[in-house]
Amino acid sequence: MAAHEAENERPVKAAKLTDPSESSSGAALQHKWPDIAPWAPGEIILLQVTGCSNLLVSKVIQGTYKSVGSNQDKPVYEKMGDTIASLGSLRPCIYYSDQGSDRAWCLGSNVEAGIVWFFNPNLAIENPLEPPTDGWRLPNGPQDRRLRIMTIGQYSNITELVDALSQAQENSRQCEKLLAVEREKLQDAEKKIQEMQEEKEQLSAHLEEQRRVSSIAGSNAACWKYLENGNWHAVPPEANDQMHQAYLAYLRNPSPYNRYVTINSAGVARYIDFQTMKQVRLDTKMVRKIQIFPGVPAQWVTTPARLLQQTDELKSFFVKVTDPHIQDTVREILRFTGHGQDSSQICSLLCNAEVKSVHRVENWRLWQGYKLRREALRKEHASYNVLVAPAALDLDAFDAGHGKVMTSNQKVFDCGEALAADVDEKILLHGTSRENANSIAVNGFDHRTCDRGMYGKW
């Protein structure tokens, strides 16, 4: 067989097959083929050719092949369907060639043309009537490791082939239905992933806001002041930040090393003693008292040191209220507002409620976050010239003598910090379970965790 150079994409005329792995003398293939039974001409075998490293050749040879006759007692497989027009009458075939000592399966043009693109001398095949799956080589060239020839099926007659094709078409339709179902599932999954991604972004934004609130510990949320002539004066912002960071270190480890610190700001050096809460100005030797103001309502009783060291420990946030007026007011609200008038609701039990104790939540981190949001609301209203009209309270009070119980008692619950009328700040009460109340005390309200409420879903 004439040589077929690897880089030449044009098929060549077959002459004599020689094994490229042999020496340069071009010794012929000497393999002995086993005895085989004659091929039944009425039997139909389908093959599938895939792969091929040569792009041009692959377009010609890839596809389905059907047994159409025999050559030397082996089936001849011809490609089904049209091929490249430039090949003219040359039609890709797979056949067995036995030329004396040269025996091999060939993949080329029709047998009469004698053109071979690939050959396979492999004898270790399970079925002598079918070509090997791999091991196909270029004439006088290397093996193409990508080329594969697989058996699709074997049929005794054309009727069986038609039945098999019909069954294959039915299977294909069923697969399409299953595929449509899977596509729908995939779309639903992608939608859920998108929703989860959006929720993740919201949670990330919420976490970032919490981090920003936490970082206020180093800014003006907690303000250091010094006493001069009976009045408290704020230290400069740079000194405030330095003092705050040093004080946090002292709270974590109240050692002599952390007790004293020298603060330099605006050309002034101050010597600080956190235990006695005094500062000495080093240039004038003036001694003054210092104090940290955590920026919380006046009625809060938790010390600044404890506020700045709060963790997620629940008991660190609750402070029992001893004012009897507040306790009486809570009882009045529970009895004469809400859904107590509807005896079919469990809330009607509150008509006879007795208040055992009232606790105020003193969560420094949540309070700073609330103040930030309130200030942001002010700026939004100013940017868009929004004027807020007061919202009515006591819409569900059912006793004429207590019709304004929430409105008249706003000041009772303001903790000593006047409500901001410019954003219509209001004190509201929220009824929930003990577990939810504890979670709110630690983490605050988060509407994303609410499934439904008395007035519907959020």
Image (cartoon, rainbow, N blue to C red):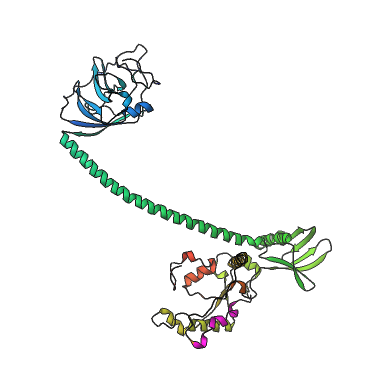
Q: Which residue is nearer to you in this view: 406 or 236?
A: 406
Q: Reply above or below: 91 against 16.
A: below
Q: Position of residue 155 (x, y in %)?
A: 18, 34
Q: Residue furthest top?
A: 25
In-image side of 423 versus 195 (left or right): right
In this orientation, does residue 168 appear?
A: yes
Q: Residue furthest right?
A: 284
Query: Does the magenta portion include 412?
Result: yes
Q: Position of residue 143 (x, y in %)?
A: 36, 24
Query: Does the magenta portion include 83?
Result: no
Q: Position of residue 232 (x, y in %)?
A: 75, 70
In this orientation, does residue 135 appear?
A: no
Which region of the structure is painted magenta? 400-418
In-image side of 167 versus 203 (left or right): left
Q: Quadrant of residue 228?
A: bottom right
> Total marks drawn?
0
In-image side of 340 versus 411 (left or right): left
Quadrant, the N terminus: top left
Q: Position of residue 77 (x, y in %)?
A: 24, 27
Q: Which residue is nearer to you in this view: 379 or 210?
A: 379
Q: Which residue is located at x 44 percent, y 82 percent?
A: 340
In-image side of 136 versus 45 (left or right): right
Q: Reply above or below: 134 against 369.
A: above
Q: Reply above or below: 294 against 150.
A: below
Q: Quadrant of residue 58?
A: top left
Q: Residue furthest bottom?
A: 401
